[in-house]
Amino acid sequence: MITIPTDERSLSFLDEVVADTPGGERIAHCMQCGSCSGSCPNGPDMDYTPRTLFALINAGQRERVLSSNTMWCCVSCYACTTRCPQDIPITDIMYALKRLSLREGLAGGTDAPALAKTFTGLLDKYGRSFEFGLASRYYLFNKPLSMLKMGPLGLSMFTKGRMSLVPTKIRQLDQLQAIIKKARQLGETS
């Protein structure tokens, strides 16, 4: 168990996380059992496990939490949420932390926001992910020199039929775009 120093903002940060998460008040019921951390497929890649992250939130370690990669490593599988004995909406808390991190400008330690922006741009345009476009656009605009390292992987995926060089659109894309537009409008008003 790590020792976490507290500061005077601890209540306000916890309150902010709770306010930004539907059902977020349940975080107060966390008993630090570790079910969430043990359930997470990406736990080893996280700066802090969900359990440790909740302890940091309770201790008011705002910058430490919001600049970590933990919420960006969350794959939204909901394994943690379904296994939590206290019914804490852990995945929803991760989304709230992503929003707070972006708002505070503390997401700079990870590439996830840039990757997410590239992904959602392709989703808006085609209605589905387009792996070649996702990888090439992301690396071209964010890590151009690293793009060369991805060549062998891309070639292997292409030869095994796992990656197309041309995107395909879903049927009735206009309906999906209308849903996305409405969701963005609702997000701006709340």
Image (cartoon, rainbow, N blue to C red):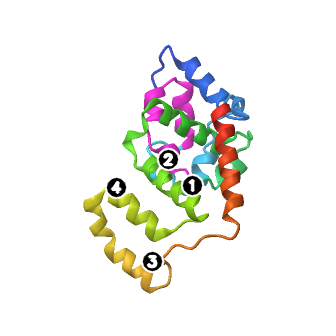
Q: Are marks 3 and 1 in contact (CB under 8 Å)?
A: no
Which tag is nearer the camera, tag 3 or tag 2?
A: 3
Furthest residue in direction top, as rendered: 8
Chief secondary structure of the magenta portion? helix
Q: Are marks 2 and 4 in contact (CB under 8 Å)?
A: no
Q: Amino acid at mark 4?
A: Phe
Residue of label 2: 72
Residue of label 1: 75
Regarding mark 1 in the picture, which secondary structure is present there?
Answer: loop
Labels 3 and 2: the sequence-earlier one: 2
Figure quadrant of the C terminus:
top right
Q: Amino acid at mark 2?
A: Trp
Q: Amino acid at mark 3?
A: Leu
Identify the mark at residue 109; answer none if there is no mark: none
Residue at 27% x, 68% y: name it.
148
Q: Label 1 crowding class (10 Å Cα cut-off): few <14, some 14-19, many 20+? A: few
Furthest residue in direction left, as rendered: 145
Q: Amino acid at mark 1?
A: Val
Give the residues in magenta.
Answer: 50-74
Give yes or no for residue 71 being in the magenta stretch. Answer: yes
- Label 3 and label 1: CA atoms lie apart by 25 Å
Give yes or no for residue 119 being in the magenta stretch. Answer: no
Q: Position of residue 111 (x, y in %)?
A: 40, 49
Residue of label 4: 141
Residue of label 3: 165
Regarding mark 4 in the picture, which secondary structure is present there?
Answer: helix
